[in-house]
Image: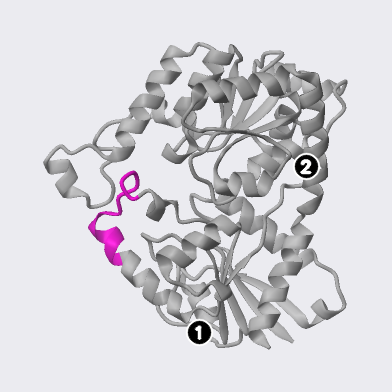
Amino acid sequence: MIKIAIDSGPLSDGHAVRGIGVMVREQINALKNLKTKELKRIVIENFDFQNEDGRKKLESGEYDVVHYPYFFPYALTMPEKKQGKRMVVTIQDLIHLVYPKHYPPGIRGKINFFKQKTRLKNVDAVITISETSKKDIVRFLGIPAEKVHVVYLAPKKIFRRLEISDSRLAETKNKYNLPNKFALYVGDVNFNKNIPNLIKACRVAKIPLVICGKQALEIEERGVDLRTLQGPRDWARFLFNIPHPELAHYEELLTEFKKSKSVIRTGFVPDEELAKIFNLASVYVQPSFYEGFGLPVLEGMASGTPVVVARTNALTEISQDAALVVNPKDPKDMAEKINTAIRNLEVRSRLTQKGLARIKDFSWEKTARETIKIYKEIWE
């Protein structure tokens, strides 16, 4: 019998309702629910290596494979010593290393990054979520390509096509004061998401933009200033009044919010309501400069909503020919494609059908099976 432990720490911290938390929760559930004859020999247990009980579990030596499903280069997300007979880590993306000027590590971050790279030497396999992320892992962390395995994510089953006559759609539309036609974006509004250009594009296209996610509201409600963005122990930046690179981005974003009267920020939306908003949307747009995967793209496709994505490696990898592709630095190009996806009925129908076909390649059961295969390979 193979005994596997998975770090469930991301389910109890700030990542719980974000992409990382969703991924870890769905992955653990899928692994536990997977039913095959050979899996009777596999036991899945959860732990949090950051707390004492979790450390005691690991130090008992009873686990054959220990899996850390989250990696951050500038924080200690893995233990110093190897735990279990075999060790696996999932690295979603390395955006902080791809755009170092926008995500400076600070002194502590640099020290942690050195420690993280040292700790990666204990790992028997790395799982990542796209070929794009795999290339970055090989490039920035020096891990051999044969040690890095790509396992795609999947949307939750709640994201599906609903009947347009469903009265629940009307209730959600009224609840969030949504217009009849609108472009939708779901997620954070960090630099890599390219939201200022999306706002400009929707203004050119003359189509309202709905942004679902708490961060778009929080940057205004909490205020954006030097202190809130100084970063942990970043005293030099604070003392010499050097702005954090994210400050310029947030100021630009707030300026665009104020200039555009047709941007609706809903804040956090639970999945039950979000699934309906996807169905109500005229088009889903993912304009990012960089993504490790882009799960909302699949959620849009599963909902039968036409999708527009930036010409970004991971996004084109995931969407293939089931989305219109735009230059993320060109709002006019983005506006043209948004209008095409909404107003050209032939293109709209084609995108919907291709999206529904593409989504069949993704499921959490498939993700679980491929993950189990990696566990077995390194164990045997």
Name the residue rendered at 46%, 31% in the picture: 329
Q: Quadrant of residue 355 in the image?
A: top right
Could you say where residue 254 lies in the image, as x and y percent from the top left? 39, 23
Name the residue rendered at 81%, 31% in the picture: 350
Mark 1 or 2: in front is 2
The answer to if 204 sits in the magenta stretch is: no
Residue 299 vs 109, above or below: the answer is above
Which residue, as the protein is rendered here, is positioned at the far left?
240
Residue 219 shown left or right of residue 40 in the figure: left
At label 1, which amino acid type do we have? Glu
In which quadrant is the N terminus drawn? bottom right
Q: Quadrant of residue 262 in the image?
A: top right
At label 2, which amino acid type do we have? Ile
Residue occupied by mark 2: 158
Q: Judge the density around disc 1: few (<14), some (14-19), many (≥20) Cα neighbours within 10 Å.
A: few
Q: Which residues are magenta?
A: 100-111
Circle count = 2
Residue 18 shown left or right of residue 247 in the figure: right
Could you say where residue 322 lies in the image, as x and y percent from the top left? 73, 39
Residue 154 shown left or right of residue 290 in the figure: right
Name the residue rendered at 29%, 39% in the picture: 245
Q: Judge the density around disc 2: few (<14), some (14-19), many (≥20) Cα neighbours within 10 Å.
A: some
Q: From where the camera sits, is residue 265 visible? A: no
Q: Which type of secondary structure does the marked residue at label 1 adopt?
A: helix
Residue 142 vs 241, above or below: the answer is below
Residue 274 vs 201, above or below: the answer is below
Q: From where the camera sits, is residue 149 visible? A: yes
In which quadrant is the C terminus drawn? bottom right
